[in-house]
Amino acid sequence: MRKTVIANWKMHYGPVKAGAWIRAFRRERLPKDLEIGVAVPFVSLAAARSSLGRAGVPYLGAQDAFWANEGAFTGEIGPAMLKEFALSFCLVGHSERRQHLGETDDMVAKKAISLQKNGIRPVICVGETDAQRKKGETLKVVRAQVAAVLSAGLKVDGAGSPIIAYEPVWAIGTGKACSGQDAKVVHEAIHDMLNKKFGKAASEIPVIYGGSVDARNVGEYLSTTHIDGVLVGSASLDPRAFGMLCRASLPA
Ligand code: PGA
């Protein structure tokens, strides 16, 4: 499986700044064998759609979606609306949404399934908090989060096949990255669950790592068994730094 690198801009860059990022990123030399995607804010999807491909980024994504395709849900954006932008993927269950907006495992599962039905890959984010890690509950918490989407009817389904992102909450935006070896244990546990559920087809589901990934540590993650890619927040905001990270992702 080719390695995946996904940028998550979070709440940065409206259409004007998104356009500037993409123009700058076009100058970056990128490794051919990398699956590169960028998750942009809703308001920048149109700007990104028209120019991201020319910057060598084949996969455009959103950062969230509601579970219903349309209806009386003021302020929400449904998967069918996102489909008009020919999105490849959409993040769901990011810990910032679980923390600040009260998203539950049940909501995350409904969003993931609905995206799949619309042919958009859900990138399902899971991960333990610092307190849970200190209590030795990492695997218990992550297994429960993954089990919630599996039991809701997640499928391995061509264009809508999921990606699981293991993002320890304590490592997000803190500069305290999880070591490759610690992440490996969790990734292995997730792969085991997927293998039990889907058998051979599970090999189509990448399990990627997120949390303080940068150009210096990305090589360590991507050379660790069971880590199929990375989700990058802060280090993706500067197009040159993100270009450098992409080049550092694969052995020269
Ligand atoms: P970070 O964010 O790279 O800034 O730690 C990662 C994420 O939240 O996806």
Image (tube, helix red, strand yellow):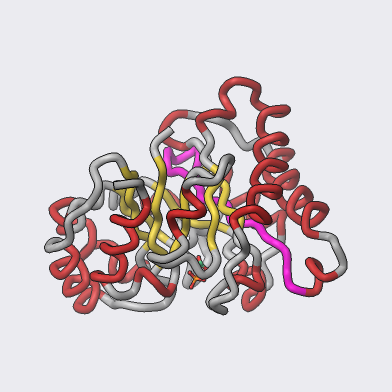
Asked whether residue 233 is in view, the answer is yes
Q: Does the magenta stretch include residue 120?
A: yes
- Residue extent of the magenta highlight: 115-130
- In this rendering, the answer to whether 238 lies above or below 47 is below
**32 displayed left or right of 11:** left
Percent from the top left, x then y, of residue 229? 47, 48
Residue 70 visible, this orientation: no
Residue 226 falls in image quadrant: top right
**Residue 180 spot, x, y in % from top left:** 59, 55
Residue 184 x/y as whole percent = 64, 48
Q: Is residue 174 left or right of residue 190?
A: left
Residue 142 to residue 161: above or below: below
Q: Does the magenta stretch include residue 235?
A: no
Relative to residue 205, is residue 199 depicted above or below? above
Observer-nearest of 175 and 18: 175
Quarter residue 237 falls in: bottom left
